[in-house]
Amino acid sequence: MDFFYATLGLVILLLAGDSLVRGAVNLSLRLGVPALIVSLTVVAFGTSAPELLIGIKAVLDKVPGLAMGNVVGSNTANVLLVLGVPALITGLHTADCDTRRNYLSMLAATVLFMVLATGGVFGFWQGLTLLAGLGLMLTSAFQEALSHRRKLATERRAALEAAGAIVDPEALEAEAEAEAEAEEEGEVEGADPDMPWAKVILFLVLGMIGLPLGADILVDASTSIARDFGMSETVIGLTLVALGTSLPELATTVMAAMRRQADVALGNVIGSNMFNLLAIIGISALVGPIPVEPGMLRFDLWVMLASSLLLAPFVFRGWHMGRSWGIVFCGLYLVYVVVLLGG
């Protein structure tokens, strides 16, 4: 029954998280918040809501190892499994992907996380440090998006001037911003400009009720499973819970791979990993201390870093992630899980 309740809690979490994202996105757009800000904040935090609620619930229930295991295990699964499975199915063509800056930010977040972990516990100040890193990441992403907008406006102006057209710089800039806003709004997950207010409120209510309920069921069931099988909550977090919370990313990357959108697949994994490290543990550490088990310092954190470094040739050299690489990635993840459960 514990496995049933764990699955039930996970399903409630994922559905409630999706509901919260849809409600929060459309509420923000209705209130006039720019789509760029919505995508960087509301969507990013909303899609990480299941992991965040698990982290907070685990800390409050005095099983913080579950929170730590979920984050570290999810980051490892995101690279090895979430990218490995679509590589097996269709392959990922990364030659045209421009994710270098975000990838370096993910590596920086990983190193920062590991350095803080050597202190043996994530407390209040470590949490604030991680959230400061999150603020820098969001600021950098916002500036990069604005720079992209200005570049598009400059290219359009140059094209019009070359054609001999009379250019009004202010009108051109306003038009470029309007087009960029419309394009970004269309790319925001869950955006529906015509969604009725009643539906927006319903999504928000379902999300706010379902998230704590699902987290409560999943954490309690996972703790019981760990106790019944003589495992630590950290191991359950690294395997069962981490795998479950990685399912939305897996679905997204598989669809992106089938549509030949390797940049979306890579960007989804990189963004998710950064948020897991900086936001989930950062916020959870403000609720209560999160000890770092010695075994995690010796093994799991290094596996997480090594899996992240495996992406380097695909990001910087544009290597094709074909089926052979999919087998390697999935095989490495299987070995990792076997080692964890065998230990």
Image (cartoon, rainbow, N blue to C red):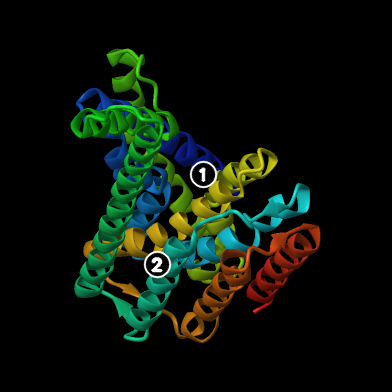
Up/down of 89 relative to 65, above or below: above
Up/down of 110 relative to 269, above or below: below
Q: Which of 267 and 60 is in front in this view?
A: 267
Where residue 276 sits, quadrant-wise, is bottom left
Q: Which of 128 and 190 is in front in this view?
A: 190
Give the residue drawn at x 65%, y 58%.
81
The residue that disc 1 covers is 10
What's under tag 1, amino acid-wise? Leu
Where residue 208 sits, quadrant-wise, is top left
Give the residue drawn at x 32%, y 85%.
119
Residue 3 seen anywhere in this rendered image of the structure:
yes
Q: Nearer the viewer, residue 27 or 216?
A: 27
**Image coordinates for residue 99, horizontal then vertical, percent:** 49, 59
In terms of secondary structure, where does tag 1 sit? Answer: helix
What's under tag 2, amino acid-wise? Ser
- Other residues around mark 2 within 10 Å, as few (<14) / some (14–19) / many (≥20): some
In terms of secondary structure, where does tag 2 sit? Answer: helix
Give the residue drawn at x 33%, y 43%.
154
217 left or right of 125?
Answer: right
Residue 228 seen anywhere in this rendered image of the structure:
no
**Image coordinates for residue 27, horizontal then vertical, percent:** 26, 26
The residue that disc 2 covers is 105
